[in-house]
Amino acid sequence: MDDATRTELEAAAFRRLRDHLQARSDVQNIDMMNLAGFCRNCLSRWYQEAAAERGIDMGKEDAREAFYGMPYAEWRAAHQTEASDDQKAAFAESHKHAT
């Protein structure tokens, strides 16, 4: 497989993941962090970092809007719930060695 095709396939898979997570707004970011070690915010940050590596000036909120499909504050108001004590404890445990 040539590099261009591989890049196209990776981009298509990323877009499908983005679209899937937009459709699954019931899945909370903290649950993703606890189970997988990343969340929508991580993905939007990686998107922002990829833009910066290519000399594209993209702010944090612009990257989040590109990933969430709407302004982050709007998404939070519509979909994010307060984390439970169990979720917070699981997050603290899974990230206690993170630097």
Image (cartoon, rainbow, N blue to C red):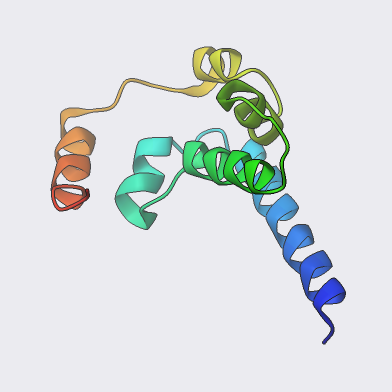
Residue 91, position as x, y percentages in the image = 22, 42
State left or right for residue 25 relative to residue 16.
Answer: left
Q: Identify the image quadrant of residue 28.
A: top left
Q: Identify the residue shown where x is 56% and y is 33%.
A: 25
Which residue occupies the foreground of this view, 41 or 31? 41
State left or right for residue 52 relative to residue 37.
Answer: right
User: Residue 69, relative to residue 18: is it above or below?
Assistant: above
Residue 16, position as x, y percentages in the image = 73, 54
State left or right for residue 53 relative to residue 73.
Answer: right
Which residue occupies the foreground of this view, 56 or 36? 56
User: Residue 2, relative to residue 88: is it above or below?
Assistant: below
Q: Identify the residue shown where x is 16% and y is 41%.
A: 92
Q: Quadrant of the N terminus?
A: bottom right
Q: Identify the residue shown where x is 71% and y is 44%.
A: 19
Q: Identify the residue shown where x is 59% and y is 21%.
A: 61
Residue 96, position as x, y percentages in the image = 13, 48
Residue 22, position as x, y percentages in the image = 65, 37
Q: Which residue of the protein is positioned furthest toward the front in this rendering?
A: 55
